[in-house]
Image: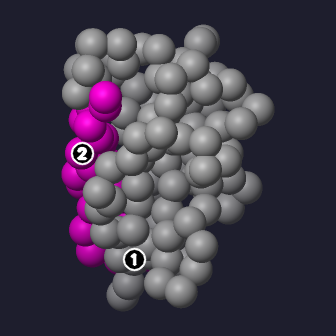
Amino acid sequence: QVQLVESGGGLVQPGESLRLSCAASGRTFSSYTLGWFRQAPGQEREFVAAIIWSGDSTYYADSVKGRFTISRDDAKNTVYLQMNSLKPEDTAVYYCAADLYLSAGRSRLSAVYDYWGQGTQVTVSS
């Protein structure tokens, strides 16, 4: 069983940055593929970024590529999402997710992740 707790959300102006953190319980953190997803009001949850358990390959949604960076610190059981050049359309609740040994090819699919955090609100507004 893995428990995930996100932090770092808030209200920022367009063009500013935020770093989200997701701390996980458990002793096999390095064996998990970790993903960030987001859900805006009235919209479906969408993929943002993933970092794969084997080799730390990273994948991004086209809408955030070049602005967001996902990283992990296995010693701290924590995954991060650095968000730069934020836009109003990035406003959403952001969730981290984890799945054991999840392959890169499936890492964009929210339905396959077994563990989810409670979410953290990110609001980008002037």
Quick one: SS at disc 2? strand
Q: Residue tagged by mark 1? A: 124
Residue depicted at x 45% and y 75%? 91
Query: What number of labels is visible?
Result: 2
Mark found first going from the N terminus, 2 or 1: 2
User: Residue type at mark 2?
Assistant: Val
Q: Is residue 98 above or below residue 75?
A: below
Q: Which residues are magenta?
A: 1-24
Place residue 89 in its image quadrant: bottom right
User: Residue type at mark 1?
Assistant: Val
Q: Is residue 10 magenta?
A: yes
**Residue extending furthest toward the front:** 1
Judged left or right of residue 125, residue 118 is: left
Judged left or right of residue 54, residue 99 is: left
Q: Residues within 10 Å of mark 1 (few under 14, many from 20)?
A: many
Place residue 25 in its image quadrant: top left
Q: Residues within 10 Å of mark 2 (few under 14, many from 20)?
A: some
Q: Is residue 84 above or below residue 81?
A: below
Residue 14: x and y, percent? 43, 75
**In this view of the protein, which residue sits in the foreground, 51 or 86?**
51
Judged left or right of residue 26, residue 81 is: right
Q: Residue tagged by mark 2? A: 5
Quick one: SS at disc 1? strand
Residue depicted at x 67% and y 45%? 108
Residue depicted at x 39% and y 47%? 116
